[in-house]
Amino acid sequence: MTRPRLPEMLTIQRLQIQSICLLKLDVARSERDPSGEMSLEINYKAKGRRDGPNVTALVEMALVARPAQVAGDATSFKIASTFRIVYVLAPGPEIGDDEAQRVADTNGVFNAWPYFRELLQSTLARCGLPAVLLPLARIGELAIHGTAPPTAAQKRRRTTAPAKG
């Protein structure tokens, strides 16, 4: 894991969350109830920009589940969302587009993660689908990877049987 450089740390210390808003939610599931083991894929990306005195991060997150034993693109369900996070930037040196993007890649994803976890839990239940517990976000890993990095134990559990009920 790489450590943030001093200018990035100074920017992070100047940030305060003003608002977090769900902008988009897409849910799709197959008509058949999933059975057997599922392969889960979690993807995310972020876009940061300056908006006057603020920094805005648009964070897209998605969970896709496929039957583990079926080849191809047989998706059992997909939940995709976009969150907008607005940060107030305390007075100080101006930051550029690159630094606003780094804020989105790290803080934006990290701050949206618990909202996505809750959204996932409630949406899966409403769809009559098995529960999925996302791992905790680790900001250093989130900034480096484009997908949720599994721990060693989670790598062994990449596929999961649906919950009974």
Image: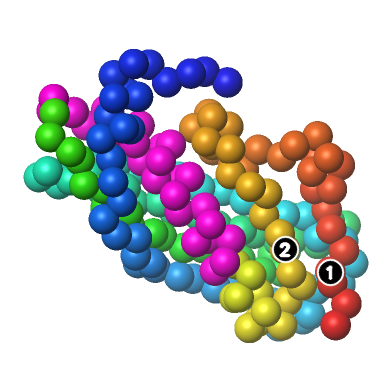
How many numbered marks appear? 2
Q: Residues within 10 Å of mark 1 (few under 14, many from 20)?
A: some
In x, y percent, where is residue 119? 54, 69
Q: Main secondary structure of the magenta part?
A: helix
In x, y percent, where is residue 29? 65, 75
* 164 on left or right of 63: right
In x, y percent, where is residue 48? 29, 41
Q: Residue at x 32, y 24 (%)?
A: 8
Q: Quadrant of the N terminus?
A: top right
**What is the secondary structure assignment of the residue under circle 2?**
loop
Tag 2 or tag 1, which sits nearer the N-term? 2
Reading the image, the residue beneath label 1 is 162
User: In front: mark 1 or mark 2?
Assistant: 2
Q: Is residue 116 above or below residue 29?
A: above
Q: Residue at x 65, y 38 (%)?
A: 149
Let me know if residue 87 is in the magenta part: no
